[in-house]
Amino acid sequence: MTNRRTLLKAASAVLALSLAGPLAAQSTEPIPVVATFSILGDMVERIGGEHVAVTTLVGPNGDAHVYQPTPADARAVSEAQVLIVNGLEFEGWLDRLVDASDFDGLRVVATEGIEPIAFEEGEDHHEGDDHAEHDHDDGHKDHAEEAGHDHDDEEHAEAGHDDHHHGAFDPHAWQSLGNAVAYVDNIAAALAQADPANAADFYQNRAAYVAEIEALDAEIREIVASLPADRRTVVTSHDAFQYFGRDYGLTFLAPQGLSTESEASAQDVARLIEQMREENISAVFVENVADSRLLEQIANETGATVGGTLYPGALSGPDGPAPTYLDMMRHNATTLAHALRT
Ligand SMILES: [Zn+2]
C-alpha cells in the first residue's frame, strides 16, 4: 500500500513537473481545482474564470458539516492541482478524504489570515475544558452566557455529546464580507502559484470581485442601519451567523450549536423559548440545508413569525435566490431586514 502510494505520488509529481513546464504556459487547458463546498466553488470560478475547471464536493443546498465523501470525490481530489478548503475545522471529513486520494497538489486554507471568532458558547462542550467564565469580552454573546451556564454540565454529561468535535473557532467565516476579501486573496494567490502564466488574469478578476464585495458590504450596512435598535435579535436553526452579527450589529441565537451534527437538546430549546419571550424576539428564520420543523415549533410556541429562509453555508441552485456567494449575502441581509422591519 505504502509502496503503491509512493509510486503514484512520484508519478503525479512527474506529471505536475511536466505540466508546470513550457507546455503549461502555452496551454489553454484549465487547471483542475477542487473546492470543498459551493461557496468556495463560486469564489474559485470568479477568480479562475476560464483558466480553472472547478469540482465542488458539497454542492448547492448540501450540508458540509455532515458530508460523506464519495469515491468520485477521492478521484477528483487525486486529479486536482489545487484543493481549496475553508479550514477552522469546518470540513471534518477532509483529512480522511485526502488520505484516501493521491493528492499531490497545493492545498489552500481560504480562511488563512482572517480574525476568527473564538468558540465560546456554553451550548457545546469539550471534555475537561473550562471555557465558561473567561470569554465574555465579545458583547454579542452575553445572552447565551447568562441563560446557559447553570445547566451545562449536567446536560452535557447526560446527552453524551462526545460524538461531535469541532475547532476552537467558529468556521462560518464567509458570513463576513470582510473575511471574503481574505478568502479571495488566498484563492487568487493559490491559483497564481499553480498557474503562473495566467496570474495577471487571476489578480484582475480578484480586483473586480473585491470591488463588488465591498460595494455589497456598504449596501448591507445601509440596510441594517435602518433597523430599530430593539429589533436586532433573530433566531436561526444553527449557530452560523456570528460573523454576520459581528459585522452588522445583529444578534443571532440558535437552538443548535456551531455544527448541524449535534441535535438541539430539549433544554436548549426550552431555554431559547424562554429567552425569546423575555426579550420579545419576534422573528425566526429557517435554513436551506436544515430541517425547518424545530424552528416552526419554536415560532408556534412563542408567536414569532417565520421570517424566511436564510442560507448559512451553501448556495441555492441556479434558480434559487442564492446561486452565487454575493447573491447569498444579499438575500440573507434583505430577508432579515424585511422580517425585522415588519
Ligand atoms: Zn454551519
Image (cartoon, rainbow, N blue to C red):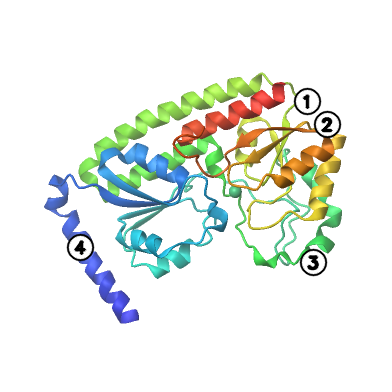
Q: Is residue 153 left or right of residue 128?
A: right
Give the Cα separation between the discs numbered 2 and 4: 62 Å
Mark carried by residue 230: 1
User: Which of marks 3 and 4 precedes in the sequence?
Assistant: 4
User: At which x and y percent is residue 295?
Assistant: 73, 43
User: Which of marks 1 and 2 precedes in the sequence?
Assistant: 1
Residue 247 seen anywhere in this rendered image of the structure? yes
User: Tag count in the figure?
Assistant: 4
User: Which of marks 1 and 4 precedes in the sequence?
Assistant: 4
User: Which of marks 3 and 1 precedes in the sequence?
Assistant: 3
Residue beneath the point at 75% across and 45% down: 136
Residue beneath the point at 45% across and 40% down: 182
Secondary structure beneath label 4? helix
User: Which of marks 3 and 2 precedes in the sequence?
Assistant: 3
Amino acid of disc 1: Asp
Mark carried by residue 15: 4
Q: Which residue is mark 3?
A: 157
Residue beneath the point at 81% across and 58% down: 152
Q: Is residue 35 left or right of residue 115?
A: left
Give the Cα separation between the discs numbered 1 and 3: 36 Å
Q: Is residue 305 above or below residue 312?
A: above
Q: Nearer the viewer, mark 2 or mark 1?
A: 2
Q: Is residue 166 above or below residue 215?
A: below
Amino acid of disc 4: Leu
Marks 2 and 1 close (CB-CB < 8 Å): yes
Mark carried by residue 280: 2
Give the Cα separation between the discs numbered 4 and 3: 52 Å
Q: Is residue 129 above or below residue 150?
A: below
Mark 2, Cα crowd under 10 Å, few <14 / some 14-19 / many 20+, is some
Residue beneath the point at 87% across and 36% down: 278
